[in-house]
Image (cartoon, rainbow, N blue to C red):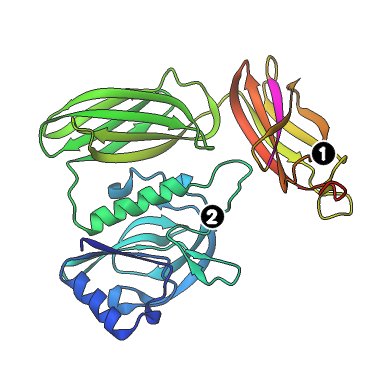
């Protein structure tokens, strides 16, 4: 065993023999990553009771985790606790990611809450992320990446290359890559919107020397898109094996954005909109509207595009659509896209609860 991952479970629920086995393994050199521990566990480095903090966005404190886009993880509940370990990331002045030694082993505490279920009786390795956000997708992959990096470090695996520094902006990604030995490598770069969709891709062949290497990936041709963007970089060797990976958040904002969008906020006196109902929607545009359009799309919960229309952008754009629920869809998704020609530069969306016609279903 190289490392142990425990998520969302309090220390006291483990039987004594399992506790002893875990402690023996870690003290002998096996790594441990503990997620969402909400109670004191002095045996593994927790001091005092943990306090639940509502929602805060963490940020990196040390360079060891500077290749994790903490700002993209979102604000989620976490447990603040006292520690004498190394704080790698913090939120609102509280430890969020901590490294501690236990015998020969390394322990990494990830403080976010990982409890699920209507009765809070289920656990997971990510926070209880929502299925749907109006302005982004759930950052599941970035949580997985963070956990993987913690496991690698807990297992004391030395990756062949590391990222010492990164300066990522709308023009370039300037990375300082430290290589343990001279090697040939390929850098794969993808820039994604806050909806997880790629808007730029590139590859670059690198001849790395032992020590520090300046690597620059051009982003000047990247067109603006509203909100946080993610620059994801994977370094591979000649056989395609991953040497290391990282992601960094940055912005390249357009001169116009969608400030607000709403659709069918409340059904008139019912639990949902029904067949034949007319649903209003409205988008507020901030910035330069000349030459831009707002595209509205309506899709059902089966992913079928039901309606689409494009209107000239102005400070406020309003319209409506009629429910035609031929299949028994539970939800409609209404999307507003701010368009510059045929290119999207911003997006907001809303869910509308619908009900099928009882005469048909």
User: Residue 275, relative to residue 2: is it above or below?
Assistant: above
Taking the spot 23% from the left edge, 23% from the top edge, the residue there is 205
Query: Residue 254: x, y in percent?
Result: 57, 24
Q: Which residue is mark 2?
A: 129
| Cβ–Cβ under 8 Å for marks 1 and 2 | no
Q: Which residue shows up at 36% across the image and 51% down it?
A: 146
Q: Is residue 268 above or below residue 161?
A: below
Residue with the mark numbered 1: 323
Res 163 seen here: no
Check residue 283 for magenta coloring: no
Q: Residue 86 sits in which quadrant?
A: bottom left
Establish if 285 lies above or below 278: above
- Secondary structure of residue under mark 1: loop
Category of crowding for the residue at label 2, using alpha-carbon neighbours closer than 10 angstroms: few (below 14), some (14–19), many (at least 20): some
Identify the main secondary structure in magenta: strand
When the figure is inspected, residue 24 is found, relative to residue 85, above or below; the finding is: below
**Camera-side residue of 26 and 254:** 26
Q: Position of residue 343 (x, y in %)?
A: 58, 20
**Residue at the image point whose x is 29% and y is 79% from the top:** 18
What is the quadrant of residue 88 in the picture? bottom left
Name which residue lies at 26% across and 74% down.
22
Q: Is residue 353 left or right of residue 119?
A: right
The outermost residue toward the bottom is 16
Q: Considering only order in the chain, which callout, 2 or 1, is on the residue closer to the N terminus?
A: 2
| Between 4 and 88, the one nearer to me in the picture | 4
Distance between mark 1 and mark 2 Cα atoms:
29 Å
Per the rendered image, the range of residues in magenta is 293-300
Quadrant of the rendering where the N terminus is positioned: bottom left
Q: Quadrant of residue 106?
A: bottom left
Residue 15 pos. (x, y %): 34, 83
Residue 31 falls left or right of residue 166: left
């Amino acid at each position: 065993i190289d490392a142990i991952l425990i998520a969302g479970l309090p220390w006291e629920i483990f039987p004594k023999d399992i506790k002893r086995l875990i402690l023996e393994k870690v003290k002998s050199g096996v790594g441990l990553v503990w997620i969402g521990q909400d109670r004191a566990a002095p045996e593994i480095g927790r001091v005092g009771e943990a306090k639940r903090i509502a929602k805060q966005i963490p940020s990196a404190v040390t360079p060891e985790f500077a290749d994790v886009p903490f700002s993209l993880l979102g604000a989620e509940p976490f447990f603040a606790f006292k520690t004498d370990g190394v704080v790698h990331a913090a939120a609102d002045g509280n430890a969020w990611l901590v490294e501690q030694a236990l015998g020969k082993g390394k322990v990494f505490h990830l403080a976010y809450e990982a409890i699920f279920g209507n009765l809070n009786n289920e656990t997971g390795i990510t926070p209880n992320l929502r299925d749907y956000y109006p302005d982004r997708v759930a950052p599941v992959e970035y949580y997985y990446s963070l956990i993987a990096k913690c496991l690698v470090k807990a297992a004391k695996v030395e990756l062949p290359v590391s990222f010492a520094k990164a300066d990522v902006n709308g023009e370039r990604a300037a990375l300082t890559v430290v290589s343990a030995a001279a090697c040939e490598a390929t850098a794969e770069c993808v820039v994604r919107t806050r909806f997880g969709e790629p808007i730029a891709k590139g590859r670059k062949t690198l001849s790395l020397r032992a020590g520090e290497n300046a690597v620059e990936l051009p982003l000047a041709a990247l067109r603006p898109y509203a909100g946080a963007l993610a620059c994801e970089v994977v370094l591979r060797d000649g056989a395609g094996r991953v040497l290391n990976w990282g992601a960094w958040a940055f912005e390249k904002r357009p001169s116009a954005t969608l400030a607000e969008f709403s659709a069918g906020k409340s059904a008139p006196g019912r639990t949902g909109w029904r067949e034949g109902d007319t649903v209003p929607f409205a988008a507020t545009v901030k910035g330069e509207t000349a030459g831009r359009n707002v595209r509205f799309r309506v899709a059902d919960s089966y992913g079928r595009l039901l309606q689409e229309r494009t209107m000239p952008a102005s400070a406020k754009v309003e319209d409506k659509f009629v429910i035609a629920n031929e299949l028994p869809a539970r939800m409609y998704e209404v999307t507003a896209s701010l368009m510059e020609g045929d290119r999207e530069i911003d997006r907001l969306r809303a869910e509308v609860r619908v009900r099928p016609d009882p005469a048909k279903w």
